[in-house]
């Protein structure tokens, strides 16, 4: 009999910085960051108003300094994020976060000066610089700096904006996460009242009992209704600041910044949504069939994540870890050894306990070449998929270890690719393991939930955010109006196939409050369909595809998404044909589900 392996379900942060929020090592890291920023300020100050021919060699040093500083900020911010996730009341971590934010503001100011220098450089000097061998890996980023630098805003104005972001804009985002983490939800389970964190309450949406699912849904909605005024203020202030900055910089198109951040053409985004809108009807049929299997005429929101069969047996954390490592290894040697290391060396915080943050995430520590995964694991198949999703992000970080500093930052549109790809490996493995129609139905349901989330739920977020920002331009948007906008967006995105949706989902969806990334919704859908296309190729080629996959991930921070797809897949993503190939795999899942569940 094979010996069962036990894995730690509480992470080891001391390997990154020993001592937690009181770590001397971490404080020394922050001091080093301050010194690096100060050095960069001096080097940039030595330049004239633009880059001259004589100063070209100094540009290489500045580029490498910027990349190095970014990696060190990422290391610091990830550590603070982990500390506050495991203990939202860690005041020492909150205090240190403020110190790091101040240094980051200084860095952003000097970086804006670098971008001004790049923007002001004579065209001939610029071309000669790009032809220099040392900068060939930074061509895309340098051109972005040159094209995106805002000549209409002075250095003094940019400095003021950066200062205001620390205690204004970004502070609202931090306040949101602190507030969500502090909320306790009272839920009756089998007649007994229990106190759960928001994360634990949300996990109950996949509980086998409809009574418990509805109770959790109603309890959460009641909490949100009582706090909607406060959350509306937070969201309005974040949006208001963003709109003012856009106006100052002469940007009227709200999608301009997120598209630039994602290195994506607007044509690509609209083509993707067009294809999704065309093929929504089959997924509406899936929702209706699932509702009918549960005795309803239409899908109630609190039943969406419910198990469609009684096959939802508990999966222990150790069982999940063993299953994941086994099937990751069957895809490729690199992915398998990576997963084994992550589980064995305490990279994962999964313990099911109160007073944790509600939001799963993966934190990158690029200086030490590691990641940390955070979630609450309570023994469901959904939990295992969440774990797999975050491990996919960690593998992307792992693939980027050999990439130079500036090019490690890949756009959000690619950020969900490795996570979705990893989910597909495990979902297919579970499907192949299934022996009965009941088991197959269960797995197909889990696969289709992801399609619905990306094609319908994410679309509702996109529609809501677009419409909210348009109204916010005219003034504060009331909480009741936010509820109305959310309900309208859900009805449209779900093609009217969702009953009793959470009209307060604008509160508990954290992506609306991420100040660094406006419109953090469509990248999920992009990554999902993109990953499906890559996965189809992987199934054709087998284990030999892993190296191609790694090369694609390594290139993800260096070129646009259109160039990335053309280079590695030979496809044009501004065409409907590309998106329809990924969609075809999802439609096949719908067809199989309908056949397996037919009377």
Image (tube, grey):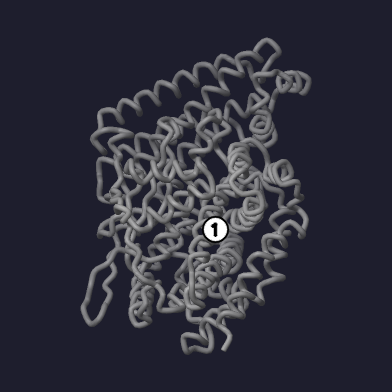
Q: Position of residue 578 (x, y in %)?
A: 74, 56
In-image side of 374 versus 429 (left or right): left
- Residue occupying image coordinates x 73% and y 59%: 271
Tell me which residue sits at (38%, 70%) in the image.
224
Is residue 328 something that shows in the picture?
yes
Residue 474: where, in percent of width, then height? 58, 61
The residue that appears at 54% across and 79% down in the rendered structure is 498
Q: Nearer the viewer, residue 142 or 202?
A: 202
From what the image shows, is residue 481 above or below residue 290? above
Which secondary structure lies at badge 1?
A: helix
- Image quadrant occupied by the C terminus: bottom right
Q: Position of residue 215 (x, y in %)?
A: 33, 79
Residue that badge 1 annotates? 424
Q: Is residue 315 above or below residue 371?
A: below
Residue count near mark 1 (Cα–Cα under 10 Å), binned few <14, some 14–19, many ≥20: many
Relative to 303, residue 261 above or below? above
């Amino acid at each position: 009999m094979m010996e069962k392996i036990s894995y730690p379900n509480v992470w080891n942060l001391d390997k990154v910085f020993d001592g937690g929020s009181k770590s001397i090592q971490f404080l020394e890291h922050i001091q080093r960051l301050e010194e690096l920023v100060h050095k960069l300020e001096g080097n940039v100050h030595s330049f004239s108003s633009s880059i001259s021919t004589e100063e070209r060699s100094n540009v290489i040093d500045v580029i490498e300094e910027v990349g190095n500083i970014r990696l060190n900020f990422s290391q610091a911010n990830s550590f603070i994020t982990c500390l506050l996730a495991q203990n939202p009341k860690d005041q020492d971590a909150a205090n240190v976060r403020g110190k790091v934010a101040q240094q980051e503001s200084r860095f952003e100011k000097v970086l804006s000066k670098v971008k001004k220098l790049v923007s002001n450089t004579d065209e001939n000097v610029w071309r000669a610089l790009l032809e220099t061998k040392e900068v060939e890996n930074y061509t895309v980023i340098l051109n972005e700096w040159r094209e995106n630098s805002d000549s209409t805003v002075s250095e003094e104005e940019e400095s003021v904006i950066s200062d205001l972001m620390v205690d204004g804009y970004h502070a609202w985002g931090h306040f949101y996460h602190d507030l969500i983490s502090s909320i306790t939800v009272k839920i009756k389970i089998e007649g007994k009242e229990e106190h759960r964190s928001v994360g634990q309450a949300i996990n109950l949406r996949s509980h086998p009992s409809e009574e418990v699912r509805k109770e959790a849904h109603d309890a959460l909605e009641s909490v949100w209704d009582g706090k909607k005024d406060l959350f509306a203020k937070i969201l309005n202030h974040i949006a208001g600041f963003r709109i003012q900055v856009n106006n100052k910089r002469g940007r009227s198109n709200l999608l301009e910044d997120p598209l630039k951040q994602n290195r994506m053409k607007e044509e690509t985004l609209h083509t993707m949504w067009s294809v999704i809108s065309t093929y929504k009807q089959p997924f509406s049929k899936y929702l209706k069939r699932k509702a009918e299997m549960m005795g309803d005429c239409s899908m109630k929101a609190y039943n969406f994540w419910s198990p469609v069969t009684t096959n939802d047996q508990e999966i222990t954390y150790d069982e999940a870890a063993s299953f994941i490592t086994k099937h990751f290894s069957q895809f490729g040697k690199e992915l398998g050894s990576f997963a084994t290391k992550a589980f064995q060396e305490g990279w994962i915080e999964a313990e099911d306990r109160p007073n944790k943050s509600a939001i799963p995430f993966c934190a990158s520590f690029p200086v030490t070449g590691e990641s940390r995964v955070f979630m609450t694991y309570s023994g469901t198949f959904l939990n295992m998929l969440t774990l797999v999703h975050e491990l996919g992000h960690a593998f992307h970080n792992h693939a980027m270890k050999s990439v130079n500093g500036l090019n490690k930052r890949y756009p959000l549109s690619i950020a969900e690719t490795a996570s979705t790809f990893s989910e597909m490996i495990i979902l297919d493995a579970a499907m192949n393991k299934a022996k009965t129609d009941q088991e197959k139905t269960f797995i197909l349901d889990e696969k289709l939930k992801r399609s619905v989330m990306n094609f319908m739920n994410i679309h509702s977020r996109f529609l809501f955010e677009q419409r909210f920002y348009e109204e916010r331009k005219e003034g504060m948007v009331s909480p009741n109006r936010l509820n109305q906008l959310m309900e309208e967006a859900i009805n449209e995105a779900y093609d009217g196939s969702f009953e009793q949706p959470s009209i307060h989902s604008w509160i508990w969806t954290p992506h609306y409050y991420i100040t660094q990334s406006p419109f953090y919704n469509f990248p999920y859908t992009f990554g999902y369909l993109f990953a499906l296309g890559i996965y189809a190729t992987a199934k054709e080629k087998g284990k030999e595809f892993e190296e191609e996959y790694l090369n694609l991930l390594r290139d993800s921070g260096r070129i646009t998404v259109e160039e990335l797809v053309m280079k590695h897949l030979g496809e044009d993503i501004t065409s409907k044909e590309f998106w329809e190939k990924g969609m075809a795999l999802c439609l096949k899942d719908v067809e199989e589900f309908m056949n397996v569940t037919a009377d």
